[in-house]
Structure formats: C-alpha cells, structure tokens
Image (cartoon, coloured by chain):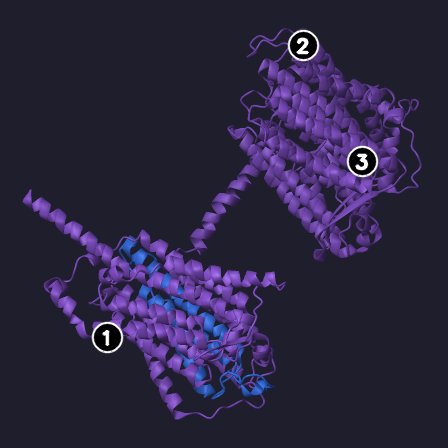
Amino acid sequence: MIEENLLLILVGLPFAAAIAASTVRASAHGAAAWVSGLLLAAGLAILALLHAPIGDGQVLRSTLRWVPSLGLNLTFRMDGFVWMFVTLVFAIGILVLVYARYYLSKADPVPRFYAFLMAFTGAMVGMLMSGNILMLVVFWELTSILSFLLIGYWHQGQAARDGARMALIVTGLGGMCLLVAMLILGQIVGSYDLDRVLAAGDVVRADPLYPLVLGLFLLGCFTKSAQMPFHFWLPGAMAAPTPVSAFLHSATMVKAGVFLLVRFFPVLGETELWFFAVTGTGMLTLVLASIIALFRHDLKGLLAYSTISHLGLITALAGIGSNGAILAAMFHIVNHAVFKASLFMAAGIIDHETGTRDMRRLSGLIRFMPVTGALAIVASAAMAGVPLLNGFISKEMFFAEAADWHNGTWLDNSLPYLATLAGVFAVAYSLRFIATVFFGPDAADLPKVPHEPPSLMRRPVELLVLVCLIVGILPGLTLGPTLNLAAQSVLGPDLPYKDIAVWHGFNLPLVMSLVALGVGVALYALLGGRIAAGPEGPPLLHRIRAQRVFERILLALTWKLPRVVHRTLGTERLQPQLRLIVLLTIAAGFATLWGVLRQAPAPLATDLNPAFALMWAVGGICAVGAAWLAKYHRFASVVLLGGAGLVTCLTFAWASAPDLAVTQLLVEIVTTVLLLLGLRWLPKRREEIAEDKLLPARIRRARDFVIAVVAGTGLAGIAYVMMTWPLIPNVGDWFLRNAYNEGGGTNVVNVILVDFRAFDTFGEITVLAIVGITVFALLRRFRPAPESIVLDDEQAGLEDRTLADALLVPSVIMRWMFPVMIVLAAYLFFRGHDLPGGGFAAGVTVSVAFLLQYLAHDVRWVEARLTVLPIRWMGIGLLIAGATGVGAFLFGYPFLTMHAQYVNIPLIGQVPAATALIFDAGVFSLVVGATVLMLIAIAHQSLRTTRMRERDSAETAEKETA
Amino acid sequence: MEMVLSAAIGVLAASGIWLLMRPRTFQVIVGLCLLSYAVNLFIFSMGRITMGAPPIMPKGGFINPAAYADPLPQALVLTAIVISFATTALFLVVLIASRGLTGTDHVDGQEREP
C-alpha cells in the first residue's frame, strides 16, 4: 500500500516542483532551483526506499481509475528497468539544476525555465512508469510539447524558434504514429494494460497487422531518438540553453525512443523484420553520424552528432536483441547519459567563459581552465571508449555482440566492420574535441578572457566524471546488479546473471577496440588540419542537408499547397457554397434511401378534404410567388410569405396540433413585422438589373431551378412514403400515457416541453437569449447605408402633423388593445399545462402587445410611457428556469425534475400548480425579453438615423450661414 | 390528404431552396423562412396525419395512445418554430449590418464581377 502511494508521489513530485517553480519571482534564481532540487532529491529518497522490493524482483503497481469505460486507467508500474531509468533521470536532473543555477544569466526569466524543466522531468518519469500503453503515449506527447517549450526558451532568437518548431513537428508526427501503433496493438491484444501487452508477444507477432504496428511503432521511436533520416531536429535543438541540451540529449527526451525499443522488444522483436529495420537503421545512424560529427566545427554540433551516433549504437543493440545485447543497450543508455551530460556541461562552460563554441577559434584552453579541461578530457575519453572508463566497457559489449553470429544475413556479417568503422570515427572526433579546444597555441581573438567557472558550476561535471571512472574501473560492483535486474525485468526472471568485467582476456572485441583507437588517432593526425579548413560537414555529404529538405517540404505543405488548393477548389462566394451543400444533401439522401424507400404494403390514406387541397393550392401559389417576387417586389414577397405561413398554421390546426397553430400564428406576426422593419434598410430596386437578362444569368437560374425541383420532389417523396407507413408504437405513446400521472398536465405537448424534455427547452431558451443579445450587439455598431438616411421626396414633402394623424383611429384602437392582449397572454400562459397555450405562446403574445404600441405611435412616445428592459426579462427568465431546475436538487432529485399538483383558488377554481409552471414562467419571460429586444433594436435604428439626419442638416445650415 | 401535404412540403422546400441560392440577401432570408415551413411540416408529418384528436387528455384514468395524435413531433416542431424565428431575426440583422457596411445587398458583400 505504502509502495503504491510512493509511486504516485514519485510521478507527482516533478509536477509539484513545476508548479512551485512557476510561482516564484522572475529574478529568484536560487529559490526556484532550490525548490526543484529538493523535490527531486525527495524523489531519489523514494527511489532508494523502493529499491528493496524492486531488488526482490517485484513489479510495483498503482492504479487510479480515469476513464474506465475506455479501459483507460492511470496505471503506474515500476520494475527493475524503470527503476534504473527513473533514478538516472532524477539524478541527472538534480545535477542539471545545480548547473543551470549558475549558467542562466540574471536577465533570463527563471520561473519559466524551471517550471518547464520540472514539468518535462515529470512527463518523462510518467512515460517511463506508465502501466497503460495509451497513457504512455499521452506522457510521450507531453515530453514532445515540453521539449518544444524548452528548446524555444530563448524565443527571441530565430534559431531557437526554428529548432523548437522542427523538434515538435518531427517528434509530434512520430508520436502520432506511435499512438496509432498502440491503438492497433491494444486491439490485437485486447487490452491496453502494459503487462498484458508485454505478455502477448506471440499473439502480436502472429497477427497480420504486425508489420504495420511495427512500422508505426518504429517511426515513433526513431523520430524521438533522432535516428536517420529523422535525426536533423537534434542538431537544430542545440539552440536551447546548454542545461536543456545536457538534460534532453543525455538522459531523457532522446532516450525515450530507445527505452521503448528495449521495453517492447519482447512484444515486437525477435523477428527478421525487426532485426533488419532496427539494427539496420541503428548501424546506419551510428556510422553516418559519427562521420558527420568529426566534421562539425560547432562544439555542440559535434556533441549533437555524437549523441545521434551513440543512439544509433543503442538502437542497433536493441535490434540484435540477444540477452547480452539488451543488457549492453541498457548499460550504454546509462553510460552515454553520464558522459554526454558532463560533456554538454563542459561545452556550456567553455561557451559561457569564452563566448564562442567554434572549435576553429578555440585553442589552448587547458592553460586557462585546467580543471574543466581535465574533466572534459576524461569524459571525451569515455566517449571514445578508452579503457578503464565506462564508455569502454559498454562499447566492448557492443563489439562483442556485433562480432557474434546471430542469423548469418549480410547485415549480420557486416556488423563487426561497421562497428569498428564507427569506433574509428568516434575516437577521431573525441580527439578533435580535446586537441583543438584544450591544446595548441593560445587562442587569439576570443570574445572573453577565459577563466575557470564558479566551482559550483563545475561540481556536477566533477561528479559525473567521477561516475565515469568508478563505473569504468569497477563495473561489476557498481552497476552490475542493477543492470541484471533491469535485464531480467525485460527478458524474464530466469535470465542468467551476467557478470560485467573490465578484462575478458585478449579477444576479438579488444582487438576491434585497439584497431579503432589506433586508426582513429592516425586519422585525426592525418586529416586534422584539413577538417578545420573545410566546410561544416563531411565532404560531399555537407551539401545534402536533411534540415533544408525538411524546411522545403514544410514550406510546400503549409504555405504553397494550401494556396494552390484554395485557389483551385475554394471560393469565398456564398452561392457556390450553398449550392454545394444542397447538392451534397441531395446526394446523401439518395445514397441512403436508394432501394430502401418503398411504399407501405397497406398505405395509410386519410380522406381528402377538398377544402384542404384548395387551401394548399393557395399556399403553394403563395410560396412560389414569394420566391418569384423576392428580388424586385420585396413587400409583395413578404405578404405572400405570410400567406404561406398562414396556410402552414391552418394545417397544424387541421391535423390536431392546436399548440403549433397558436405558436405559428403568433410567430408569423412577429416575423412579418421583423421583415417589414428590415425592408427599410435595403437598396431601392425599381428598374431591372440589366445583367439579369443575359444568358449566363438565365443559365444559372435554370440550373438552380432544376436543383430546387429535384430537392423538393425528393423531400415530397420521402414525406409521402413516411406518412403512409402505419405508425409503430413509439416513445410518443409513453408520453401520452404518463403525461397526466407523471407530469400533472393534460396538454401532452406542453408537458413534454416543460417537464419530460425540460432540459432541451432550457437549452433552447438559452439559444434564444444568445441570439437576442447578438442581435442587440450587432446593431449597436450599425452604420446605415447613406442613401437610407435621406428621406424620400414624397416623405419629405409631408408635414410631421400629417404623419401623426395618418393612423389616428387605428392607433387609438391599438393603444386600447394593450391590456386586452396582456390578459390574453395570461390566459394562454395559465391554461398551457392543460390546454393549448403555454409559455412560448404567451411570451410572443406579450411581445406583440409591445410591438403594437411601437407601431401605433412613434418610438419616443412609447418609451416615454412604457419602460421595457428586455435584457432583464431575459436574465430573470433564465434565472427562474435554472432555479427551478436546481430546486429539484433540494429534494434529492436530478436537475429539472418537476412536481405537479392542483390547487383550488376561490372564484377561479382548480388551477394546476406544477413546478413546471414556474419553469414555463421562465420560458415566458425569456421569450418576451428576446423577442422585444430584437424588435426594438431594429426599430431603434430609424431613431438613430433621424438623429443623424438632424445633425447633418444642422451642419449644412451652419455652413450656409458661414 | 397525405398526397396534398407531401406535395405542399415539396413546393415549399423547392421555393425555399431556389431562393437560398439567389444572390440577394433578402431572397435568402425569405428562402430560409419558406424552407423552415417545409422542414417543420416534414417533421410534423412524421407523426402521421391525425384529425380531430389533439394530444390533450382527459384528467386521470387509462387512455389509449392510439386515439391521439403523436405529441413528440409536435413538441419538436414547437421549439423549431421559435428557433427559426430567432435565426431569421439574426440573419436579418446580419443583412442590415452587411448592407450598411458594404453598401450592397449582394450575399458576398460585393456585386458579381462581369
């Protein structure tokens, strides 16, 4: 139990450090480093506690339920391999923190740096400890994103931004491949649990999808571990601050890929395909990167390519996959992390103290910084594989594996030669690093006078170099048990214990090492001078820059291609888009219904009432007329539209839907008024547009006519077939049966709206409120078209008096209608639960009442007498509806549960007093608010133009007098 | 009745769709109104045509659902009517604003290039 919690704490610690570090002051270097360092140290203490159970061969697990329905749990697990890796991450993390404390300048924003670094550590630890393969991908992606932020930490520089973006794109694409691979893998195995996946190797390898899974999986690993041809992001990432490089490119980020390769070797490995893909890529990367490294002039560039080449070495070992190779891969993961971190730090110190990283300018530094020089020499000797240092032993193991017989293929046979070749270049570039930077004459034109760094900045390097020495001299005593434990947790508990020793006698690997050392030194002695004079990169190869290729592709994909596609396929015009939507809808309708749609065996047929047919003859003419006249005779079109609406409304009444009829009628009134208000702002169109008579316009219209007829006929056909099929028992029956007992109302439609499906209604009135406010907001900034401001000649000729008297009698009647309509609204509202009516109808009625007043008098007259605050109506409506819903919680029911009851009120009689009525009141209030808000907002525009007109005429008058 | 109603839906939809593809904003709004009638009637007709049997019950007691019109399409259409009013209002305001801003009532904010 304690161990389970410790696992969770271990993952949480770096994230806690990130949050703590992000809250300190921007200049508090010490505080952020201390907090982060202490929390990481606590992590190391936990790891020490966990060593006892891990040492017994236990696998610790801790599970938090996350999305159980998807099989996604936050499972953390730890075995020997993970323990070793997490310890490495935490230990190097602390050293990097100490180093960064002195490396960053006073001007750098500290909280961001430490927060990102710690969050990255957390993501890495989470990835290592994930017990679920989907969660593993989540943490994997998190490391990509955080590495992007870390590499781009100095975002003022172009190089940092480019490098960060490139790293993100490459590793992000790889991460996507990995996600797909994991999803397929989970489907094959039937579980996303890592333990079950690891145990299902035979099933996976036998599956027909195995090559696909392997390909995608390897793409993920190779991009992360900078294997060729995806290596180019890593040198670009050297724009990051050196502590970041030292951390990301030694122990973490790039090691995530090889971690997965080793971890999933039991599942995906042990096939020929795996051997060729993984070993082949690894060897290619190992050899090519070591050659390129020799020719780089930038100190960090050399180290970057050396990192790529060592990652290739580990990848090749994972590809070989024998017991010894896996052990060697693990060993080299640790060794490389140790010596490469120290080398990056040393390079950072040199950069920091001299102001340059160009090896052609650096020289003779051993006299200025003897301690740092000595440390760097030891570390690069470890990198070269000099005996008695840790790099030598794992390299020996690699040579031994390369020389061993595995499957006798051409790749297997060429392994020892390729390995020795890479070893030669590794020796040469390590030698170049030492010889040019620390020896030779004093450098002449350095930006700064070099000197030793603060001793604390050097301390991490000293410690790491000490580890190189100790492990190199006593490998069996120091790392032996841990490595064997790690190998057992990957390859199975029956793995025999392998003793790691410095001296194995005079054997083939030793010969290979000696050849590499000898030829490497000779190579540098011969070529050293010419390399410094040459270009940045090996002869011929320096012209092919993977980075350049990548940038070209990126440019083509993100800039040129979208523009071409947009030019050829896209349009900003609405008409083609709408036409496309209509055509696609028709196509979708045909595709789905073709062959499925058929006449019912015994079609339903209601007797035709001639009046109904006649009514729709009129309705159809109205609709077609409205369509015909909408361009040149807008007013007539609105009237005809109203006619079609009225026929619709009568149809509802005819076919047993009184509620719909009432609502449709009221909404029809409001819509017509709205359209009439809008007409005023449209341009005059009295004479024909000449262009409309031309052939292209006629063709367009004919085409649209065909589309419209096809769509209309299709819809009519579907409607007819559906209507004539007998109705099967459906959910409507349930509503009918339970409306009275459960909802306490006899008008089932209203009960559905305010009780059974009240949540839908709640959403709907919210939409209405949003639309109301949008209309209001849009019109606040509205500038009318200039010609709409000027009055017509006819209008201008009339005196204001005449206008006021024009509608005298109707306006008096309208004024008197106000109270009548309010009573009507109240009547509709209260009967709603039992009889046709309800909150919607009542709300629209009240707004019509307000509207009439605006129609009868001018706006100022109305607003002097009547204050409507539509926004408040809306707010109160929403609050009432919401409160009714929340009120159900008080009685222990879910949101929007209604209660129904009848109350006897003297004189009026039985009145339904359901809580649904309160909800309906909310609906009512909101509908009033929204409708009135929209109408008033549009109506007010005329008031504003009047003001503008008055101002304009005043200005002209002023000008005239002047 | 079924024949007439489905034909009506077809005519309303065809007029609406034709207007939808026209270049003037006002035409598009009228088209949307017509289309919303068609769609509302279509949804409503999914409950089949029932005459003289509105879904209003007597108080209490057992009832036979087959004797009443299907209430569900009606409830759906009721909300649809209100929402289509709201969208009409919104489009109208966009129309007015676009007219004020661009000086034309073409849907693209500029006249078609010849």
Q: Which chain is indicated by disc 1?
A: A
* Residue appearing at x 57%, y 70% in the figure: A899
User: Which residue, given by chain and number where applicable, does mark 1 sit on?
Assistant: A813
Helix, strand or loop status at disc 2: loop
Amino acid on which the number 2 mark rests in the picture: Met
Q: Earlier in the sequence, mark 3 or mark 2?
A: 3
Q: Which chain is indicated by disc 2?
A: A
**Residue A21 in the image: x percent, y percent?**
62, 30
**Residue A920 in the image: x percent, y percent?**
47, 69
Amino acid on which the number 1 mark rests in the picture: Ile
Helix, strand or loop status at disc 1: helix
**Mark 3 vs mark 1, CA separation in Å:** 89 Å
Q: Is A185 on the left-hand or right-hand side of B107? A: right
User: Which residue, given by chain and number where applicable, does mark 3 sit on?
Assistant: A83
State which quarter of the image contains the C terminus of chain A: top left
User: Which residue, given by chain and number where applicable, does mark 2 sit on?
Assistant: A369
Q: Earlier in the sequence, mark 3 or mark 1?
A: 3
Chain shown in blue: B
**Mark 3 vs mark 2, CA separation in Å:** 37 Å
Q: Is B69 on the left-hand or right-hand side of A955? A: right
- Which residue lies most toward the left here? A961
Foreground: A755 or A311?
Answer: A755
Q: Earlier in the sequence, mark 2 or mark 1?
A: 2
**Residue B23 in the image: x percent, y percent?**
33, 64
* Residue appearing at x 68%, y 18% in the figure: A346
State which quarter of the image contains the N terminus of chain A: top right
- Single out the mark in the foreground, 3 or 2: 3
The colour applied to the residues of chain A in this rendering is purple
Report the number of discs: 3
